Amino acid sequence: MTDSKKMLGGVFAPMCTPFVDDEVSYDGLKRNIEIMNATGLRGYLFLGTNGEFKTLSEDEKKKMLGIVVKTSRKDKVVMAGTGYESTKETIRMTKIAADIGVALASILLPNFFVKRMDNETMISHILEVANASPIPVVLYNNPSVSAGLTIGPEVIQAVCGHENIFGLKDSSKDTWQKNVAYDSKNFSVLAGSADYFFDLMEKGGSGGVLSLANVFPDVCADLYNLYVNGKKEEAMKLNTKILSLNKMVSGSYGVAGVKYAMDLAGFSGGNPRRPIKALTETQKKSLKTDLINSGFLKS
């Protein structure tokens, strides 16, 4: 098994950042990791979309990563979002994360000047970061949070052979089917949503970074394990349930729904950082009822 497959084969939770009164709850963060350590997850992604990374100061990011590395069980792979709006700052943050002890860097590409980010520019940025990074890089494709910027197969084809580029997290329902074709011995393609996690595995993908794993980590890990162990019929049945769960939580309410569902499941979720609003009392009641009726949440 290559280092890419060893590190990325499985399910990651794109960890939420717990806030109390709009301040990072470092105790809540530590507690979440301690609970997650006992699950079947392959690892954790911090400072990603579910982590509300754009709302965090650099000091908060560094303090969080220090806690993450210290608290995570040694068999869990820690990945951190280190993308900035310039190649220089992305490299600098990636080196900071590496010095703290993070194993992998997740790179969301610059998108403020999205009209200037053609394939050639994307490739140049990716390769320069990969060449300078002390840790392997995992690309992050998510047009919905990057002004529509899309990492397509032409870009993947140009960079997937680089020894320090380990894979791609694809959170676009429009591109994953083409990009998963580049999953290989040394390059892993991960689903960025439970909506197509099973289908991506069917097409040769390596795993997933699933927001639902913040709430039901073992359920998500079970789906992966059933599939890779050849229990496809059981995996298909579980996948049907997971699709319904995902629609209830992040599909309907986004990060606010994920965080409230975490609270219900015994984790520290809290509210999103302002200006993003928490769920209304009516929404909370509806989500709680739906999760209890699903059978995955105890009343």
Image (cartoon, grey):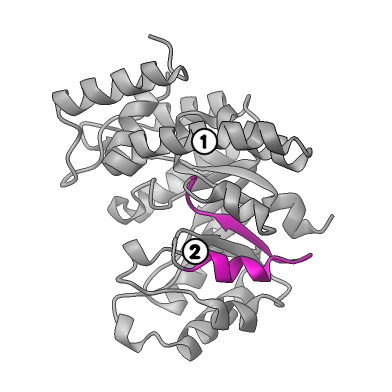
Reading the image, the residue beneath label 2 is 140
Residue 192 on the magenta span:
yes
Find the magenta span and give its range. 175-194
The secondary element bearing badge 2 is classed as strand
Q: Do labels 1 and 2 touch, CB within 8 Å?
A: no
- The residue under label 2 is which amino acid type? Tyr
Image disc number at residue 137: none
* Residue that badge 1 annotates: 240
Q: Is residue 112 above or below residue 281?
A: below
Q: Provide residue 45's location: percent of width, then percent of height.
A: 52, 47
Which residue is located at x 38 percent, y 52 percent?
49
In the rendered structure, which amino acid carries the disc numbered 1? Answer: Thr
Q: Is residue 71 visible?
A: no
Taking depth in this image into account, of 275 and 176 the one nearest to the observer is 176
Q: Residue at x 31, y 28 (%)?
A: 260
Q: Is residue 39 above or below residue 276?
A: above
